[in-house]
Image: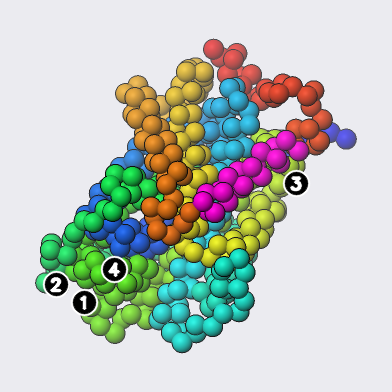
Amino acid sequence: MTEVTPSSDQDNQMHKTLRWYDGFMLALPIATGIFISVGYTIGAIGAIPAAVICVILSVVALLQNKLFSEMAAMFPDKAGGVATFATEAWRKYFTPLGPIAAFGYWCGWSLVLSLVGLTIGSLVQAQWFPDSTWTMFSFAGVAFGFPHLVSACTIVLCTVLNVAGIKVAVRFNQVIGAAFIIVLAVLAIGPFLSGDWDSANLTSHIDGGWKTFVVWLYVTAWAIYGSELCAVFAPEYKDTSRDTSRALTSIALFMVGAYTIVPLATTGQLGEAAVNENPIAFGVASINAMSGGLSGLITAILCGALFLSMISSSADAGRALYGLAAEKMTITQLDHINRRGTPSRALWITMVVNLLILVFIGNPVAILIASNLGYILAITLAVFGFLLLRKDRPQWPRPIRLPNYWIPVAAVVGVFNATILIVGVLNPGLSHAGGIKEVLLGVALLSVGVLLFGYRKLIQDRPTGQARSAAQSDAERSSESLT
């Protein structure tokens, strides 16, 4: 019996139901990273270096999104986003880099669920259940308490919503996303109008020199680079080229403003000591200082926005795994779309992994260190992949074709990402919240991707035994005929 591939089975296709503003709303909750990692960054090295980090990463994210828009338009029917771009670019040179990049990308988005869930749990505990300091159990040095229980519940709920269909997630995002934009606007403008803002509250204290600065670039990168998730929905946009490009550009510009202004405004108002004491809830403290009595409402909105980021992250991670399986880079069981057009099996697996992460790690910054290894690696391979695709497939149809000066831009961005990746992985202790354990976890997750790739090639596909893939994709054959 001949196996039907996704490209030929209409029942196993993503449904084209989204417009660019849907992609924008799905990526909007990534701005909640301000309350996940930026607060810790301010406490560790000061507001001024933290603001510089946010500006640098926001600009790099904008440049990357322009590169990814060209690649997304090149492969309009392929799911997986950045992971797929890296796989297509590097397949000719070293096939295993495909699954490494894809699993790295999946790690970056998958582990975010436990990270953001813990953030929600901490906010809920601080606002409504301050006395709930009990511990259900302890394992491997991690005390599983109230924030972990809340995180587990949110992980399960966001998975259920994604399995129900992406339009359900989009509608949920639109309701809370609008309120979140208002909150961000108040945090960006309010402190300056309140009369409490003072530039003397903005200081710098980088212990460890430039390496510490680069390590925090590495730790904070996911929170800002995450706007690229708009690309993963390319097969689901009604007008793939136009909607993908508009979504990627608009969300990147929004992040530049949000990540630059909000940290400076709130820290100048509250002072670094207050932010250090409340690295997650400093936004609530800022608005409460301006108005008073609104902490409950603001906490609820922030928790809602954080939950939206979990929905988006779960959707992205699931599509990355599905895209990998569709390209025959991991086990066939993940090459599955349910009747609602979502990769349900990949979504359930992502959920289970995150529940395990809650038990084994349970620290927000430590989770970022573990997940960023694979994520920044995938982003780096995709950026360099832009250069390879320009060289290897010059005649490939490009509905979006950037001017040639973007070639050196891609080279500079790729080197930048490779630098923060290497320095961050080699010096995790400079973050004061992670170490070799988290780095080894990131390596282990990447290794699982390689093992599943080997199983697919050696067992499920019954290959000829060649080290590199003997069979070229239809895309590669078409590329060669064009060149």
Distance from the alpha carbon under mark 2 to that under mark 3: 57 Å
Residue 43 drawn in magenta: no
Question: Are the two marked residues, 2 and 1, in contact with CB atoms closer than 8 angstroms?
Answer: yes
Q: Viewer-nearest of labels 2 and 4? A: 4
Q: Is residue 252 visible?
A: no
Label 3 is placed on what type of residue? Gln
Label 4 is placed on what type of residue? Val
Kindly identify which residue carries mark 1.
Answer: 290
Relative to 209, 376 lies left or right: right
Image quarter hosting the C terminus? top right
Describe the element under mark 1 as helix, strand or loop. Answer: helix
Q: Nearer the viewer, residue 39 or 150?
A: 39
Residue 178: percent from left, percent from top: 37, 65
Q: Earlier in the sequence, mark 2 or mark 1?
A: 2
Q: Viewer-nearest of labels 4 and 3? A: 4
Describe the element under mark 2 as helix, strand or loop. Answer: loop
For the record, the magenta segment spans 436-455
Question: Are the two marked residues, 4 and 3, in contact with CB atoms closer than 8 angstroms?
Answer: no
